[in-house]
Image (spheres, helix red, strand yellow):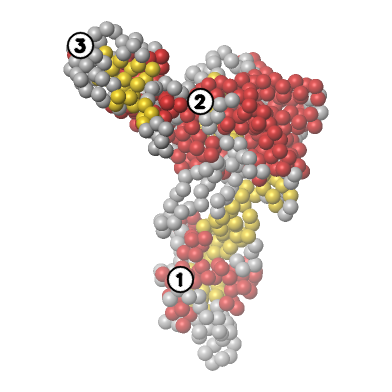
Amino acid sequence: MSANEQSAQSGQVPKKNFSPGAAKTGKPEKTPPIDRPLKRKYLPILQKLEPEGYSINAKNQLTLIDDSGDKKPISDVLVVPVKFIKKLSRDNEEFFVEVIGSAKDGTDFPKITLTMNEFEQMNTLMQHWGPKARILPKKFYFTLVHDAAKILAQDLEAEVVYAYTGWQKTQGTWGFLHADGCVGIEDVRVELTPKLNVFRLPPEVRNMKAAVEASLDLLELAPYEITMFLWALTYLAPLCEAARQAAFEPKFVAWLYGRTGSMKTTLSMLFLNHFGPMENPPATFKDSLTAFECKAACLKDAVILFDDYHPVKNRKEQAEMQAKGIYIFRCYGDRISRDRGTPTATLQESIVPGGMALVTAEDVPPGGESDVARNIAVKMNQGDVDKAKLDTAQKNQELLAEAMHGYLSWLAPRMEKLPQKLGKQFQLLRGKMQKEVGGHKRTGDAIAWLCLGLRYGLQHALARKVLSKERAQEYYLKGKKVFLKLGKGQTAMVQGQQPVDIFLETLQILLDAKKLVLVPKSAQNPSRRGLGGYYDDHYFYLLDTVYQDVESYLRSSNQAVGATLKTLYEAMHQRQLICGEVEKPGTEHEKVNYKKKIMLGDGTRPRLLALKRSAIPYQPKSGETSFQDDE
């Protein structure tokens, strides 16, 4: 075995300390000739390979020149790199190599793309090119073929390919990436996953006025509570990058719900055509959480639609459906993502969503108070959509992507100063909205962002001379009024998800159904089966087991109180719904005991939760017994 083969077998590339073609006598020796057409074809390659100890023989095989000057065949295929690719996603970078090839019979293989691991191992060529792409059967020959290919790739420069949409600053210029390139910067390559390739914008705007008018016409398709909401969300999404730089990124989910047949998906898809020609939702609740995460990471500064949240009868499927809904709330409501591990027990970098989320659903948002506070919910009813206007809008839907192209072109030269300006506008507006909407601060923030999305969309229409100042102002005031109404409705929905209210509503259900019963506190030896507590003229005295009964009932429908027993009692005390006792009053050890000692008919004095009878509308019947005793 030659020295070159030994070094290749040990994982090293061959030593290049000889003159190619030298005979054992030290005198030049002619190598077997290559056919003239082949020589012309391979001359540039030979000029790179031969000084490094490789060549091509008369059989068109890649050869290794050993220490004696002989050419030893190592492969029936010659692999020639033509391009290095540096693919940038939002959380990491990957490298690929585009290669072409040639078989020993002169067959030219088409261009393929190899991962860096495939390029180093050279063990997938036959999968791409078939049996003619054969490396001779010695394991270390794969290393030699890779080394020869690496020599041919030395002069190649890496081409940058982006794997996401949204704003990107390149050589001091801001541009907006989409599947077919970049608005504002030429010769930019973007590769999205096949299902997201529909997020592509036209190369130019043919008729700006017609495009912006087509976008504005969508406002008249349904009540403003729906269309203003979707239109503002559409024009807010491209502001996410500037908001992120200003440290005030929008943190809410748009939740559009209504019964089947209300056309919520049809209308949502029409608005989504601002970002490209789409016929199907980019994501549905049939997708896995991992698919949700990957799609959300790719679609930066755009709107992603998660379609068809709906109730299902199967308890396991319902739990999965609710978990996905809550996951979307947490991702977009907190701008965080799941931490994931690697095979080496290290953490991967989290992929944080970078756009806006729109969910279509048949039901109200799932979860407790904090989950519901992370969304703005809008209800659609059957008949809300004007079908005649919808048909006209669908015929002109290709203009919507042109309107977005114009909007992005208008924003691009403003991107450098936009974060500071947008941050100030948001801080000023959020204070006003929080004061008018009340309730959770998140709701006021979301309403402020919707107002800004509407404002910037209208300013673009004004700049394109499609709207007058008076008409733009009229639209804005109508939109602001609509959003305040939505915000107040959202506040009511959030307050309806308070743990205390959930507990009391469920308690009422259990009492009405006689799954729990209350007996007079003077009752002697009442049945313990189904007993929830006692009552007198002023209070219901509840056992601690009632909390477990309520939780058990809620769990059957994949819900929960959303608070521990102690937290629940504290919240009830703050709302003055219970009567506790002050222990060690007037001392530094003074504290409130949320439960009160009462005298029962059997002579015992337990501590029970004294709930005011006005807290729930339940009226016990005289002589009421547990439901088991009625059987």
Q: Tell me: 160 left or right of 576.
A: right
Depth-wise, is mark 1 or mark 2 nearer the camera? Answer: 2
- The residue indicated by pointer 3 is 630
Q: Earlier in the sequence, mark 1 or mark 2?
A: 1
Residue, x 31% and y 20% (percent of image)? Answer: 541
Snapshot quadrant of residue 484: top right
What is the x, y in percent for residue 192?
57, 45
Residue type highlighted by circle 1: Tyr
Residue 87 seen by the camera? yes
| Residue nearer the viewer, 228 or 27 | 228
| Residue nearer the viewer, 518 or 295 | 518
What is the x, y in percent for residue 506?
37, 20
What is the x, y in percent for residue 119?
51, 62
Q: Is residue 609 above or below residue 302?
A: above
- The residue indicated by pointer 1 is 141
Q: Is residue 227 above or below residue 430?
A: above
Q: Which image quarter is the N terminus in?
A: bottom left
Residue type highlighted by circle 3: Asp
- The residue indicated by pointer 2 is 494
- Circle 2 residues within 10 Å: few <14, some 14–19, many ≥20: many
Q: Earlier in the sequence, mark 1 or mark 3?
A: 1
Residue 177 seen by the camera? no
Q: Which image quarter is the C terminus in?
A: top left
Give the distance between the C-alpha atoms of the residues marked 1 and 2, in whole angstroms. Answer: 67 Å
Q: Is residue 9 above or below residue 592?
A: below
- Circle 1 residues within 10 Å: few <14, some 14–19, many ≥20: many
- Answer yes or no: do the residues labelled 1 and 2 have beta carbons within 8 Å? no
Residue type highlighted by circle 2: Val
Number of dots carrying numbers = 3
Residue, x 46% and y 42% (percent of image)? Answer: 290
